[in-house]
Amino acid sequence: MSPQNDIVPSMKSIKINPIKKIVGSIRLKGDKSISHRTVMIASIAEGRSVIKNFLKSADCLYTVKAFQGLGVDIRFLGEDLIIEGAGLGGLKKPQGDIYLGNSGTSMRLISGILAGQAFETTLTGDESLSSRPMHRIIEPLRLMGARISAREDNFAPLTIKGGKLKAIRYKSKVASAQVKSAVMLAALYVDGVTELEEPVKSRDHTERMLSLFGAKMVIDDQKVTLYGSQRLKAQAFEIPGDISSAAFFITAALLLKGSELVIKDILSNRTRTGLLDALTNMGGDISIENKHFNGCEDICDITVKYSSLKGISIEKDKIPSIIDELPILMVAALFAEGDTLIKGAGELRVKETDRIDSMTAALTGMGADISVDGDDIKIRGNKSIKGAKVASLGDHRTAMALVVAALASNGESEINDIGCIDTSFPEFFDLMESVSVKN
Ligand code: S3P
């Protein structure tokens, strides 16, 4: 289970002092979900894909390494990522296990592709990834005919032996893009039509990207019908900026008096913009301009200005579109007038850490008043919070949410284990520094 490579982030801690405001214009590296899918889908397409603005974060680099290990020629040419697609049937058995660090997206999606391969592969990860539920993908992939073994039938290491798969009609119990994508990627290897339905529509990057690469499918709300045995054709495109990373800057600008921040070329796919809706409903001054399309994804520029916020209620059916942004929304809610209620956020408990517990413990340590009832979270607003020594528990989004809380608090904070931020946003501190006004 040890990393055996140099991608693994360090464990250092950081002291943060409050800042006055943030001002400026930034552009972010590619969206993490889209960066992963680009490597996977281009690897099993035919021809050379040329990708701009790929996110070189630890998680995405594990996906690159995994496909290099599966025999795909992938290289960086300056800032471009060049992928020589091996075709659906062109992957090779890797030498040894594939280590995926902290990356749940890599493990769950790659499992779908491995389900279509005749050879056996074992996927491993770090301690956090090895404690995340995998039964949710094991079940449908087994129904399709893959042989999969896992510790306690639920946790990595996963050993997958695929081959000829059969079409299924599957209703997922969880609204998870990772489950949906694993089934869709496996469905490419099926001689027939696969149907997948989810309880609430989750992010649809796999649908959009497979369509761009030429796959035939029908999408009807929460149901995807995908035709198997299709050939995918290489593409060239630019990945839009990561909206989940932008979330930390958007929130910081809303909370710090006098702030005004422009974020250019950011992903604005509606399955991912739940935070923008929530913050706008809270009274946030967020404007969207320059909407455009890169062939598969919606993109825009965002301008955010300091605003006084009020508490709102977030219903369970909105959770998938805001799932990765709930930690930073909890921080925003602390500075709002009135309470904010987040309902049915149970999926937060199975992220890189239990984010309901990690955020509640750390923010309570900074003086926040938060109560948790099962999977519902109530945050009392209108509080000024104080600097404190807090734990990220090695979770990148918890760590960045706490940095923003610390920037907007009174007094110095110390946040441990911030190396984990490299899993999704290696430029986080440099960019924050570039727009920070300290006094
Ligand atoms: C992701 C989907 C979400 C999200 C994760 C990335 C993806 O997970 O939390 O960070 O790229 O498909 P679930 O699909 O399990 O909710």
Image (tube, rainbow, N blue to C red):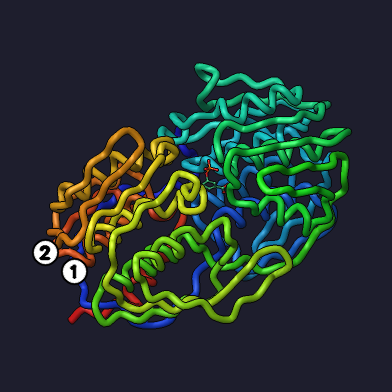
* Residue ID at (31%, 68%): 252
Percent coordinates x, y for residue 346 in the rendering: 41, 37
Percent coordinates x, y for residue 58 in the rendering: 49, 51
In which quarter of the view is residue 297 placed?
bottom right
Q: Is residue 150 left or right of residue 183?
A: left
* Residue ID at (65%, 62%): 76
Along the viewing direction, whichever of 231 and 74 lies nearer the viewer: 231
Tag 1–tag 2 contact (CB < 8 Å): yes
Percent coordinates x, y for residue 39 in the rendering: 67, 52
Amino acid at pointer 1: Pro
Along the viewing direction, whichever of 344 and 305 lies nearer the viewer: 344
Q: Is residue 3 above or below residue 276?
A: above
* Residue ID at (55%, 60%): 31
Q: Is residue 373 above or below residue 202?
A: above
Where does label 2 land, which residue? 411
Amino acid at pointer 2: Gly
- Secondary structure of the residue carrying numbered label 1: loop
* Residue ID at (83%, 46%): 87
Counting other residues with Cα less than 10 Å from the Cα at mark 2, is it few (<14), some (14-19), or many (20 or more)? some
Along the viewing direction, whichever of 198 and 432 lies nearer the viewer: 198
Q: Is residue 7 above or below residue 293?
A: above
Q: Is residue 348 left or right of residue 28?
A: left
